Image (cartoon, rainbow, N blue to C red):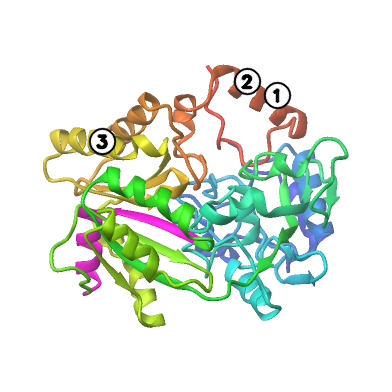
Amino acid sequence: MTQPSDPLLQDLLDTLGEEVVFNGDRIPGKARSDESRTGHAMPLIYLRPRTVAEVSEALRLCNAARWPVTIQGGMTGLAGGANPEAGDVALSLDRLAGVEEIDRDAGAITVWAGTVLETAQKAAEEAGFLLPIDLGARGSCQIGGNLANNAGGVRVISHGVTRDNVLGLEAVLADGTVISSLNKMQKNNTGYDLKQLFIGSEGTLGVITRAVLKLKPLGEGRETCLCAVDNYESAVSLLHAARKGMAGLSAYEVMWRVFFEFSSKAEGLRFFEETPPFVVLIEQTSAASIEAFLETAFEQELISDAVIAQSEKQRLDFWKVREGYALDHLPDLMNYDVSLPIGDLDAYSKAVTDEMLAAYPQAHVSVFGHMGDSNIHLCISVGKADEADHHAVDAIVYDHVRLYRGAVSAEHGVGRLKRAYLGHSRSPEEIALMRRIKAALDPNGILNPGRVLPAEG
């Protein structure tokens, strides 16, 4: 790609000023890559708009110049979606931050796209509400990115994925047109639900600038436990029992033995004498005691042991193990986020693990995730890996997803890293329709090109 002409840079500077337009040494290093660490190029121009009008003007000028724009939020993604090419204009939403309003009567919070998720959560809690969206990266991910990727997280089992918690949305199209529908109503059956076009589109159809999110009442309490489970069938039965017997079930996370043993040892924590085949983390937010549920589970032989958190520190220790931060220290760690029918998750993980160890006997394969939402994560390290190794591991993970008719991305998005495998989960007709929608909303193809949709031909 050629370098942008001086007129484009000059037009951006004349319209937005040096406080918004950065180039050269003024571009921060964080613009290079998201958490996948697969980005290697710096953008040519870096924009930090402060208003929706500035976002609109920036896109209008870039669209007129037919110039590619990479949209960036908290840079916590793992699919390479925020990674720019060397000649791109990168547009950061970090200045469009803050809680605009909490409407107690509507049970809704209006936030700017650059608002850090944890900031919005705390504002909601101070007002006596729960913001249902919750992710491990809550301290750095941004609302706009959460919506653009339709992030899942740890509360999906009780509150749904991100798109289920959005009432209204504002977005800017590629040509600068502002689509603002900051609806607060639960019911609005007036034509197409346009917000859903942008939620999960990963910035390829428009730039989200504001959102109205649902709020829920705060729970009456919170209890968390770890359960030792002897086999996968019992883990599924325990899930059924928890859904039936816990009115406030808010999390059901399953950790396979290799992952739990590695993570707990790395954190210097020990909860069971021997590591069981599966460990289930259950959390509920209600006044009812979790002990009665566990007693019944023991009687039904669904669990062999259990530990109830006796303090906030111990609860956080449970979650520290579940988050698996220690895995990041493994060499060339490859993260996968897939979704399959709940009944197939263990068979899938065994098939992938067996093939991985046959190809790479020294490999580390950890499996864990939101079993109640049919979503698991695989963290794989084969030691020092080159590009061929990455492609080989991708093929093993995603070919098995296709065999089980699952999704190659459950919550992290497709981005750059999974676009070649989109056809493993979506039909040619579906992909063709996606292309038609993209062409209608972004005819010049400037918004996050090279993401989501596989290359043609």
Viewer-nearest residue: 195 or 285: 285
Q: Is 399 left, or right, of 74 in this rendering?
A: left
Q: Which mark is residue 432?
A: 2
Neighbours of disc 3 within 10 Å: few (<14), some (14-19), many (20+): many
Along the polypeptide, which appears first: circle 2 or circle 3?
3
Q: Is residue 64 magenta?
A: no
Q: Are marks 1 and 2 in contact (CB under 8 Å)?
A: yes
Write down the residue under mark 1: 436
Q: Which residues are magenta?
A: 250-268
Question: Which element carries disc 1, helix, strand or loop?
Answer: helix
Q: Is residue 303 above or below residue 452?
A: below
Q: Amino acid at mark 2?
A: Ala
Q: Is 36 left, or right, of 29 in this rendering?
A: left
Q: Is residue 259 magenta?
A: yes
Question: Which element carries disc 2, helix, strand or loop?
Answer: helix
Q: Which mark is residue 352?
A: 3
Q: Amino acid at mark 1?
A: Arg
Q: Are marks 2 and 3 in contact (CB under 8 Å)?
A: no
Viewer-nearest residue: 322 or 303: 303
Along the polypeptide, which appears first: circle 1 or circle 3?
3
